[in-house]
Image (cartoon, rainbow, N blue to C red):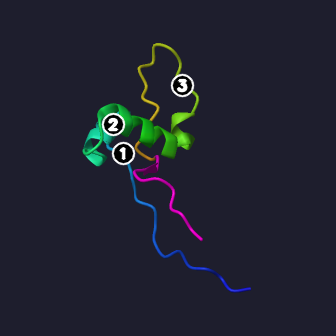
Amino acid sequence: MPVEQLSRVRKSILPQVGDDWSHIASRELPDLSEKDAIASLQSWNLHVYMRAAARMGTGSNNILPSDVIFVEPPLAYG
């Protein structure tokens, strides 16, 4: 069985310290409205967006500098 090679890697970033969805959206998807850019990022990054929220009062951001954040939709293969 032959091994298929990926022809292209999906574009992603590692967040900067203090990044939130709004910061990433404005930097990575400047051609979209903020609302649409944030919605797109969250739908492409459910592994981060659906993470359990930090405890109340901690002020912690749910995006970590070690998270891989996809800045484009899944690639179509076929």
Question: Which residue is drawn at the image coordinates 44% and 47% (left, top)?
Answer: 66
Residue linked to disc 2? 19
Q: Is residue 43 visible?
A: yes
Residue linked to disc 3? 53
Q: Amino acid at mark 2?
A: Asp
Magenta highlight range? 67-78
In this view, the residue farthest toward the top is 57
Q: Earlier in the sequence, mark 3 or mark 2?
A: 2
Residue 28, x across and y down, in percent: 30, 48
In this view, the residue farthest toward the right is 1
Residue 26, x across and y down, in percent: 27, 39
Q: Main secondary structure of the magenta part?
A: loop
Magenta span contains residue 70? yes
Q: Nearer the viewer, residue 56 or 11?
A: 11
34 on left or right of 63: left
Number of marks drawn: 3
Q: Secondary structure at mark 3?
A: loop
Residue contact at pointers 3 and 1, CB within 8 angstroms: no
Spatial CA distance of label 1 from label 2 is 6 Å
Question: Which residue is drawn at the image coordinates 56% and 42% (left, top)?
Answer: 47
Q: Earlier in the sequence, mark 3 or mark 1?
A: 1
Residue 16, x across and y down, in percent: 32, 43
Residue linked to disc 1? 15
Q: Secondary structure at mark 2?
A: loop
Residue contact at pointers 1 and 2, CB within 8 angstroms: yes
Q: Amino acid at mark 1?
A: Pro
On-image quarter of the C terminus: bottom right
Magenta span contains residue 47? no
